[in-house]
Amino acid sequence: MRTEERTQTKSTGLKAFGILFTLVYALLLTGKGYLSGKDTAELIQLAVFSIIIGGTVSLCIRKFYPLSDTDPDISVAAEKRFRVVLFLSMLLSVLFSSFPNTMWVFVPLFVVLSLFSTPEIGIVIASLLLAGTTLVSGCGVIVFFIYLVSGVFSVIVFLPLGPEMRFAYPAFLSSCCLVVCEMCGIILTINSRPEIQLFYLPLANCLIGLIVIYSAFRGYSTLIMYRYSDLYQTLCDTESETLLNLKSEDPKKYMVSLHTAYFCDRIAATLGLDTDIVKCAGYYHELTPSEKNSREDFYDDMQFTNALRFILDEYTAYIKNPGISLSSKEAAVLVCSKTVVMAVMAVFEKDKDADIDTSRLIDAVFDRFIKKGTFDDCDITFSDITEMKKIFKEEKLYYDFLR
């Protein structure tokens, strides 16, 4: 449900980086082929394929690299981090071609590239770099298959990275996959008699890979996941001074905020959004001033992050003009949660003992949103809307708290 303008938005910085990446990659891969003694025909082949690989990587990040709409500052920082990770991955992929194929530490590249972008982007780019390394080293397709399978499997078991940062069990599964693949695909096909020394390099490959992945996870958690964890924990405390003041001044608004935050939290977790930000928006949307200057002062006093400000600004604009379309999923979750809570409370205000057909009520709420065009220019998909409706309909017992 994106508009054409938002769908076609690209980063000029990523375009320039993509061109630079392609040129550097082509020079390095072709240069490695020259140093390895490739003949002229093979060097031309390497040059052509390396440009194709680099160009495909460039096109991938230009079209599909995710930029945050809710936090421009984080978007810029995330883009810079991804450029560094991508460039280092490219350099390592060329370097690996000088190593024995049992020591290509490609699994971390799959995981780290996916961590700092998306699994789809990470897998595509890592696979392309793996293809270049396989080509310049002269290894067969079996080596490419080994690292492709191990890399994709590792992305699946390690990601998404949750707040508890599970590592031990995914590390065990990833290591088992890589060792088994290398044993069956490389070691067992060696003509000489298998000896214990042959297993040293695959095991070292696993160990180095796990160290790199763990370090990347720790850095990612510090830079991104827990950047504002203490602040959001304080803001989402229902016993905070600001929320307690709202409770004493307007108990109804306080209850609306409480129940809205509950649904925001549940839905955000299901849709893969940042639960802390969306839940916090649920708590403070009733306190957000409609006048811009007052709103900015309120944000500053509360030390709200840019992401939270973006959602509340969009919510406020929608409340002033309900005919406009929302743009972000987060704001859509907030508006839908607030609307459902208010609709149920309105029925109970008329008849406290009313037996509400919540399924029918929720369908009516969303039908009205769709008819008004509330989601026309929004990031949200029909699948997301279906998930939201499902969650609202499952909470039949919870609605008793709204009586």
Image (cartoon, grey):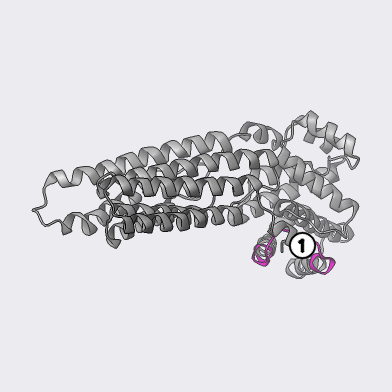
> Is residue 385 magenta-colored?
yes
Q: Is residue 310 visible?
A: yes
Where 374 falls versus 231 (above or below)? below
- Residue 328 lies, in percent from the top left, at 73, 53
Quadrant of the rendering where the N terminus is positioned: bottom right
Task: Name which quarter of the figure residue 392 lies in.
Answer: bottom right
The answer to if 64 sits in the magenta stretch is no
Residue at 81 percent across and 42 percent down: it is 254
Look at the numbered disc 1 and give the secondary structure of its residue.
loop
Residue hosting label 1: 375
Residue 373 horizontal side relative to residue 172, left or right = right
Could you tell me if residue 170 is visible in this image? no
Q: Name the residue: 81% across, 49% down.
A: 315
Q: Of residues 290 and 362, which is closer to you in this image?
A: 290
Q: What is the span of residues highlighted in magenta in the rendered image?
A: 369-386
Q: Position of residue 13 (x, y in %)?
A: 63, 44
> Which of 213/333 is in front?
213
List the single residue furthest toward the left. 193
Q: Are there few (<14), some (14-19), or many (20+) residues within 10 Å of tag 1?
A: many
Name the side, left or right, on which 214 lies relative to 347.
left
Which amino acid, mark 1? Phe
Place residue 72 in its image quadrant. Answer: top right
The spot of residue 314 in percent (x, y) is: 80, 49
| Quarter containing the C terminus | bottom right
Asked whether 271 or 134 is in front, the reply is 134
Residue in the image at 20% along x and 42% along y: 200
* In the image: residue 153, left or right of residue 371: left
